[in-house]
Amino acid sequence: MTAARQAFTRESADARRADLIEATAAVLAEHGLAGTSVRAICAQAGVSPGLLRHYFEGIDDLVAATYQATSDRMDAIFAGAVEAAGADPRARLSAYLTASFRAPVTDPELLGAWTAFWALARSDARMAAIHATSYAGYRARLGELLVACGARDPDRLAIMLTAMVDGLWLELSLDAASFGADAAAQMVERALAALLP
């Protein structure tokens, strides 16, 4: 097989896996765990169940891959927000925290998928490991940003701020009219003003 043919085949395989992951996220968001099945995912993706089994060991493997892909996507969004904020450490910290209050992070479909992932993380070891790694990475990056701002005890602050942002994100995702993204960002800013030297 030529190099060009191998590249085309690999890209097609990656694209098919990505399509199945995207379809799984959509089904989880719309139907929850109870309505997520091989049949529903394949209908959403417009493929046969055989194709799913070709790329994934089964539905559990696909849901875990979807959680990992969603976590990676969020990491990229947060990293992009930090880079767009420029060189000022305080602006970078603020951008990292408040990115959770803007699209696509506040997409209602994402809330449905996240709640399914969180539910599975309580009972499935592989999902729990993805959750632990994802949140540890988020807090570690947040800790680095806090250190750059001169924070004392950045590990504890990272835990507290992560919980605050998650709570505000959840409320915004459930009811965007409750207080709004700008108010959420202002709450985070007030917390940072009180916590940072």
Image (spheres, rainbow, N blue to C red):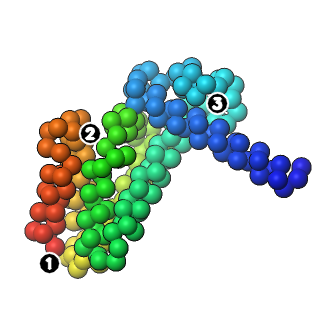
Say whether marks 1 and 2 touch (CB < 8 Å): no
Residue type, mark 3 in image: Leu
Instruction: Identify which residue, 92 or 65, lies in the foreground.
Output: 92
Q: Which mark is residue 173?
A: 2
Disc 3 marks which residue? 52
Label 3 sits on a secondary structure element that is helix
Numbered disc in front, either 3 or 2:
2
Q: Residues within 10 Å of mark 3 (few under 14, many from 20)?
A: many
Q: Is residue 26 above or below residue 17?
A: above
- Judging depth in this view, the residue of 112 and 130 nearest the camera is 112
Q: Do the residues under discs 3 and 2 have CB atoms within 8 angstroms?
A: no
At numbered mark 1, what does the secondary structure look like: helix, strand or loop? Answer: loop
Q: Residue at x 70, y 42 (%)?
A: 13
User: Image quadrant for the C terminus?
Assistant: bottom left
Three-letter amino acid code at the position of disc 2: Ser
Q: Mark 1 or 3 closer to N-term?
A: 3
- Snapshot quadrant of residue 188: bottom left
Q: To which residue does mark 1 refer?
A: 197
Q: Is residue 162 left or right of residue 30?
A: left
